[in-house]
Each structure stands twice: as C-alpha cells, then as structure tokens.
Image: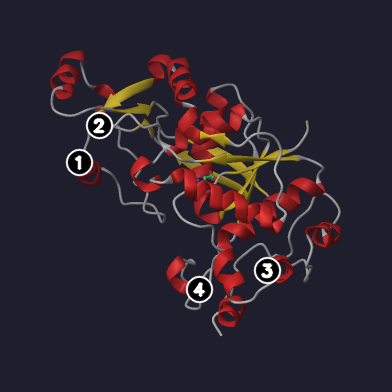
Amino acid sequence: MSVVDRYAPSPTSDLHLGNLRTALAGWLLTRAARGSWVLRLEDLDRPRVKAAGEMAARQLADLKALGLTWDGVVVRQSERLDAYRDALSMLGDRTYECFCTRREIAEAASAPHGDGYRPYPGTCSQLTEAERQRRRRERPAAIRIRAEGVSFTILDRFAGEVSGIVDDFVLVRGDGTPAYNFAVVVDDLFQKVTRITRGADLLSSAPRQAWLATQFGGQPPVYSHVGLVTNRVGVRLAKRDGAVTLADLRAAGWEIGEVIAALTESLGLGRHETLEGALEAMPPLPVTFSAPALWTGERLIATASR
Ligand code: GLU
C-alpha cells in the first residue's frame, strides 16, 4: 500500500517553529518512503478561524517557503459538510443525542485524564423517547457515538503500542459543527491517509480516532506523534515566546536555509540547509528520528531575539 501522510493545520494563527518542525518531520518521513504528502485545512471552528482564508494562505506560503511541497489539492473541512452528514448517517443508530452541559459532565464524570479530557459517563445513552423530546425543547443536542468504553490500541513510531479507552465521544457539537475527532477520521479516510505525523499533544486522541476509522471499515493509520517544541521554561511554545514564526525569524535576518538547518538539527538529523540534504541524511527505512522527543528551541529563540 502506498504511503500517504497529511498535514492538517487549523488556520487560527501563523505556524510557529513547533508546527513547522512537525510539518518537516511528516514531509521527510513521507518523502523518504516515496509517499504522498497531502494537506488539509481544519477550518470548522468558525469563531476561531475568522479571516481563515487569509491565515490559511499565510500558512501555505510558509510551508512553500521552506520547500515543503504537497500533493494534490488542499482539502478544506468547511467545504466538506455533506461528507460529514453522510458519514454520520452511515453510523445509524450507533449514535445518540446528548443534552448534557459541560458542567453536568464534569459533575458526573470521573477525574479528567492528564490531557484534561473527561470521558463521557454515558448519561444520555439510555434516555427514553419521551425524555429526549422534553430535553430537545431545552437545548440543542450534541451527537455521540456509542463506543461503550472499548479499549483500542494504536501503533506509534515513537511511542510504540498505545492503548486507550474509547468513550462515547462527541461527533457533532450542539451547534451543529462536526467535532474535531469525527471530522479528522472522515477526512483521513477520504484522503486515503495511511500515516499520520502530528504533535504529541494529540497522542491521547489517537485510539479514539483509530477506533472510529474501523467503524467505517477503515484501516487505522500508523502514527508518528512528534515531540512539542517548548520555550525556555519547558512550556509548549506560543507566539508570546518571541521570534517563533517564519516571518519573525526572517525579520531577524535569518535565511530560509538557516531555519531549515535548525529544524533538521532538532530532529536529530544534523544541520542541513536544504530539504534534499536532510532527506539524504534520513536513515534507511523504516525511518526513525534519533531525537523524536522534546527540543527546547532555546538557542533558536535566543539567537532570533538577539
Ligand atoms: N488541526 C489540528 C491542529 O492544528 C491538527 C489535527 C491533527 O493533525 O489530527 O492542531
């Protein structure tokens, strides 16, 4: 089966070094396997992606400036609402309406997981039709999948086998927007994705998403969750940390080749000013980065803000 990996930014802000590093890792892993690297803009979260068109264009321009070329057309989630509707109907009566508020879930659920996620305790899964009708008048329902706490194991290139309990997670939010965990699965199947390279903050979502893929008859992808770039005090990099976007670094006098070299070095590949050089430095397949975990980015930021 040919390798297809994807990069799926949300056009909410400029890509920072952490995002660019993840994109580069995915690109290198894919190109080393002679695979296709496809792009998807996750622009469903309307309030957060205002002026999404402009931001998306800037994100694509940054990827291009680094030479991270992609294959085929860029998929935009906002143009795929029919696909989400069809996918939902395929699940038929395996879904149910949920009227719980965030507060009700917090009161009924067990303690949040390390990532702050609270597994849904199933409160609305057994409502009678009469109860549902009454509650529909109170608030719009979210739609959940009946997963009933199955355990699912995914394979990650860096973390190995990772198992997670799949709760009855949300597919469609109360406002009618497809939820992240649902849309990505529908899209990954649509884009024939076989590998996913993305930030390590999403590792805990992977068992849930991979399980859902199997419910549509799909094959779960192989994951590479790449360590997050952090600031000097070990907290995940953010815009406020200084010169962290490509535009910031260029304004500080950095050439593109220097940015690429800093990123390839952070991936344990040594310094390479071109992507071709980095690709040649990739170990033979199956490729693993020697330093997939955390890179502080300290030197880069310190130099950039000098
Ligand atoms: N859109 C998500 C983000 O920008 C990434 C989702 C994914 O790769 O599954 O953080």
Q: Is residue 3 above or below residue 9?
A: above
- Judge depth for marks 2 and 1 and give the one in front: 1
Marks 4 and 1: CB-CB under 8 Å? no
Answer few, some or many: residues within 10 Å of disc 3's Cα (few below 14, many 20 plus, some between 14 and 19). Answer: many
- Tell me the residue that label 3 is attached to: 259
Q: CA distance from mark 2 to mark 1?
A: 9 Å
Mark number, residue 104? 1
**Disc 2 or 3, which lies upstream in sequence?**
2
- Judge depth for marks 2 and 3 and give the one in front: 3
Mark number, residue 231? 4
Residue toward you, 150 or 64:
64
Q: CA distance from mark 3 to mark 4?
A: 17 Å
Q: Secondary structure at mark 2?
A: helix
Amino acid type of disc 4? Asn
Q: Is residue 158 visible?
A: no
Horizontal and vertical percent position of residue 40: 57, 39
Residue at 39 percent across and 41 percent down: it is 45
Q: CA distance from mark 2 to mark 3?
A: 50 Å
Marks 4 and 2: CB-CB under 8 Å? no
Horizontal and vertical percent position of residue 199: 56, 54
Amino acid type of disc 2? Thr
Residue at 54 percent across and 62 percent down: it is 16
Amino acid type of disc 1? Glu
- Judge depth for marks 4 and 2 and give the one in front: 4
Q: CA distance from mark 4 to mark 2?
A: 40 Å
Amino acid type of disc 3? Val
Q: Secondary structure at mark 1?
A: helix
The quadrant of the image that shows the C terminus is bottom right
Residue toward you, 173 or 61:
61
Marks 2 and 1: CB-CB under 8 Å? yes
Question: For this view, does 44 lie left or right of residue 107?
Answer: right
Answer few, some or many: residues within 10 Å of disc 2's Cα (few below 14, many 20 plus, some between 14 and 19). Answer: some
